[in-house]
Amino acid sequence: MDEPNNCAISVDKLTKVYDGFLAVDHISFCVREGEIFGFLGPNGAGKTTTVRMLVGLTRITEGNARICGYDVVKDYKRVRQVFGVVPDVSNLYFELTSYQNLLFSARMYGLPRDLADRRARELLRFFGFGKMKDRKFKALSRGLRRRLAIAAALIHEPRVLFLDEPTSGLDVVSRRILWSKLKELNRAGITIFLTTHNVYEAFHTADRIAVINKGKIVTIGSPRDLSKKFGFQEVIEVGFQPRNPKKEEIMRSVKGVLAVRAKGGHLEIITSDSLAALEGLARFARERGLIPSMLMLRGADAEELFLRIISEAK
Amino acid sequence: MIEDLTRSFHIAVKDLREYYMKPGSISWGILFPFVFALAFMIRRGGLTEWLAPGMISLALFFGSTSMSAMSIVFERRMGSFERLLLFPVSYVCIALGKALSSFLLGVISVVPVFLLAQIVLQVPPAHPLLLVISAILGAFASSTFGVLLSFLVKQPEQVMVVFNLVRFPMMFLSDIIIPISSMPQYLIPIVLALPLTYMTESIRFSYTGTYDVVPPALSFAVTLIIGLVCLILASITIKRSKP
């Protein structure tokens, strides 16, 4: 683990047991100041439970965690001043306008009226609300609700922002706007803890990623490091005439093949040694009288890498 | 302390903006006690001096409990209650904020019933200042009781059912309609265990200058203690609601 003074969030042997079920199993990690940290895992892996323990919504069974130096349990009032939370559901108040929602959050963080007003207006401008600032939350689009939820979490100028599935359910335009704003905030020095099961989002936005599965941290590293570490870089997409062979047949006969899966009318062959696999495939096809109808070599995408990491952990 | 009180006030203002127009608040909090008082006026040939304080107490009780049931149920269901838990405030502050909005609705709901009693009876309250104090204490005890009850019910959608299961028997057993002194002996321990009994007795003394069973000093003190105990229990319940 990194030096504690470099950690915006430091987690030490954090554990959660629900009625005998071990949801989070002695996990330890450090989120460095100023980074976007992706927390990735399949459903039920323990992502949300971990975040809920960090922000004080779920009791910790064992271990401890600090955010900006404050213990999340012992310093529960002070620690809340240094982080903001955007849950997966935009849960602001329906009958309040965008401005009133922000003003309420500001006052609850103890900001004086004039400062609260200024911060609310600044954030509404930053997130492009314009005339929507006086519109009730219930009348906002999903994208605007999401932006307002983020603005509410930023009202007290936190040093750490927890984002849970920030772009879930948003269209491409809203997603892009949101990420450009989040990157801008990150450049301004805010540490972002991104919880997601969207592998692409994590790999394209995070500086480092922790993969959690069955309550345990499987690996931590930058997207590039993870690709290298798991030696999982290429995919051969191939289709044959008159028919595609069985996956097991390829796995048995072609060297360097890690996995094969059917996708549409063709096969995706995942390999750690593309040259050996291509040679083997050519021989395999000749011997069986198969004619390639399509052939493409590409780098493995994030989802494939993620599946590999999870399967290795099993 | 002052900071926490200010934040409780912000929660209350937010709740009033968010929920005061919701059907549950209006129907159970304002309309029901008023219509109930009206019904008694018509059916029993007039709102008697004995019944009037009971109706005021009923309005306070229903008004002060309906808003908390409404706001807490809605927020627990929508997940917005967790927003409050993320602010740097104490659990007592949250419970007090929730109770304060209910308190205000309770006080508002008393006004039409009080005016009705004044128009019909044309008798001024025996102790006007004590009436204000007893109404404040009653609204405080009822609102914190409502907040506590809202959190004790595990399934938010069942809150209104549970509230009415608790409120209606209390209404008939707490000196509102039937005097305690004319109740059978075996019911007295139950009657004396109900918070509404002390609240009604304190209002009765303030309004008419007489009381049924519980002396005024005791009824005022117990009402205050009930309010404080419910507030503390509600904040403990909020804390323990974390999985």
Image (spheres, grey):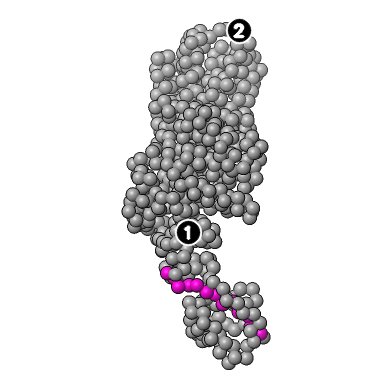
Question: In the picture shown, does residue B189 fall above or below A20?
Answer: above
Distance of mark 2 from mark 1, alpha carbons?
Answer: 71 Å
- Residue type at mark 1 is Leu
Q: Would you say residue A232 sits in the magenta stretch?
A: yes
A207 horizontally vs B117: left or right = left
Residue A40 is labelled as 1
Q: Residue B206 location in percent, x, y?
A: 49, 12
Question: In the picture shown, does residue B18 fall above or below B39?
Answer: below
A180 horizontally vs B210: left or right = right
User: Residue at point 51% right, 25% down?
Assistant: B103
The answer to whether one can see residue B165 in this image is: no
Label 2 marks which chain's residue?
B
Q: Residues within 10 Å of mark 2 (few under 14, many from 20)?
A: few
Q: Nearer the viewer, residue B224 or A220?
A: A220
User: Residue at point 67% right, 86% down?
Assistant: A242
Q: Secondary structure at mark 2?
A: loop
Q: Would you say residue A248 sits in the magenta stretch?
A: no
User: Residue at point 51% right, 38% down?
Assistant: A155
Q: Main secondary structure of the magenta part?
A: strand
Magenta residues span: A229-241
Q: Secondary structure at mark 1?
A: strand
A224 horizontally vs B160: left or right = left
Q: Residue B22 location in percent, x, y?
A: 62, 33
- Residue type at mark 2 is Gln
Q: Residue A290 location in percent, x, y?
A: 63, 88
User: Residue at point 61% right, 35% down?
Assistant: A97
Question: In the picture shown, does residue A135 fall above or below A42?
Answer: above
Determine the image quadrant of residue A239: bottom right
Residue A105 is labelled as none
The answer to whether one can see residue B35 in this image is: yes
Residue B122 is labelled as 2
Q: Residue B32 location in percent, x, y?
A: 61, 26
